[in-house]
């Protein structure tokens, strides 16, 4: 089963990320890719299901390629980089949906995910007794280093919501990120970063007017960065809200 929906709406508000079995490898080596949905770097594996994907690609020194796989397999595909450099792996999923039975559940969800800017509009639009319907999609990325030296960096893939590492985390502790929504800088969005070894020690910041936020990574290891953006859904869509979930993984040496 392709697990994006969980038992309850508030419980569903989980991260989705790409976790290569190796973030640093030599040219010609195979890197199986695992997909996860969960919280605090613990979650359920999601198998390869291309019918659910808009784009599943790798971008690197040799260009952009689709990521192949076998339906239902975990790992969910693999890449074999042939040239040294930094590679960006990206997955943009097709929309899924979730519903909230009560206003309290929805408000708790907004507050947890840093979406407080939507509270006033929610209170204007909410009708007692009616479920709140949301459609959402995922925009997950991962950076891998191929070769013994660090060359290149992250690439803009053109996802609807996209976290872009403007500094290379394989080279420096200072991680400067830019968040784009529909190709434009998104200001005021909450961005959260945490390591696999200490997932509860979260770094948090809001993007500035240029969509940028900066963290100093305090430890080495595998990291996950996340952000969520929500807007009212179109009147004829049948949904109340539309959200996009962005993530970025890498290994800081």
Image (cartoon, rainbow, N blue to C red):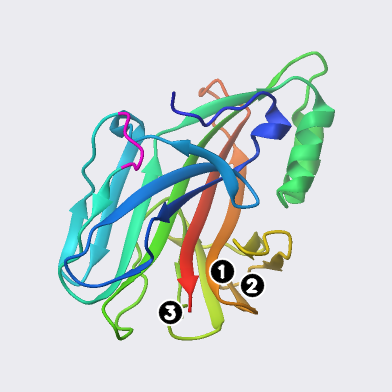
Distance between mark 3 and mark 1 Cα atoms: 22 Å
Mark 3 is surrounded, within 10 Å at the Cα level, by few (under 14), some (14 to 19) or many (20 or more) other residues, namely many
In the foreground, 152 or 241: 152
Nearer mark to the viewer, of 2 and 3: 3
Residue 192 shown left or right of residue 137 in the figure? right
Mark 2 is surrounded, within 10 Å at the Cα level, by few (under 14), some (14 to 19) or many (20 or more) other residues, namely some
Q: Give yes or no for contact between labels 2 and 3 (Cβ–Cβ under 8 Å).
A: no
Q: Give yes or no for contact between labels 2 and 1 (Cβ–Cβ under 8 Å).
A: yes
- Secondary structure at badge 2 equals loop
Residue 16 shown left or right of residue 120 in the figure? left
Q: Earlier in the sequence, mark 2 or mark 3?
A: 3
The label shown at residue 211 is 1
Q: Which residues are magenta?
A: 72-76
The label shown at residue 81 is none
Q: Earlier in the sequence, mark 3 or mark 1?
A: 3
Report the residue at 61% width, 72% height from top: 209
Magenta region includes residue 37: no
Q: Which residue is mark 2?
A: 208
Q: Which residue is mark 3?
A: 170
Give the overall secondary structure of the magenta segment: loop
């Amino acid at each position: 089963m392709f697990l994006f929906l969980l038992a309850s709406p508030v419980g569903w508000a989980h991260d989705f990320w790409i976790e290569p079995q190796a973030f640093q490898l030599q040219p010609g080596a195979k890197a199986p890719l695992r997909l996860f949905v969960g919280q605090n770097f613990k979650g359920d594996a999601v198998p390869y299901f291309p019918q659910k994907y808009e784009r599943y690609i790798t971008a690197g020194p040799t260009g952009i390629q689709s990521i192949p796989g076998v339906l239902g397999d975990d790992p969910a595909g693999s890449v074999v980089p042939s040239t040294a450099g930094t590679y960006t792996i990206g997955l943009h999923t097709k929309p899924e949906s979730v519903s909230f039975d009560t206003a309290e559940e929805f408000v708790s969800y907004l507050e947890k995910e840093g979406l407080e800017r939507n509270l006033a509009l929610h209170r204007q639009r909410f009708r007692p007794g009616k479920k709140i319907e949301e459609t959402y999609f995922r925009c997950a990325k991962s950076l891998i280093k191929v070769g013994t030296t660090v060359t290149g960096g992250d690439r803009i893939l053109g996802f609807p919501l996209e976290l872009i590492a403007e500094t290379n985390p394989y080279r420096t502790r200072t991680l400067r990120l830019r968040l784009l929504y529909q190709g434009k800088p998104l200001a005021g969005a909450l961005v959260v970063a945490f390591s696999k070894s200490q997932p509860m020690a979260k770094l948090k910041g809001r993007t500035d007017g240029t969509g940028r936020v900066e963290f100093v990574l305090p430890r080495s290891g595998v990291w996950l960065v996340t952000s969520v953006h929500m807007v009212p859904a179109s009147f004829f869509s049948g949904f109340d809200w539309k959200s996009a979930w962005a993530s970025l993984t890498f290994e800081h040496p």
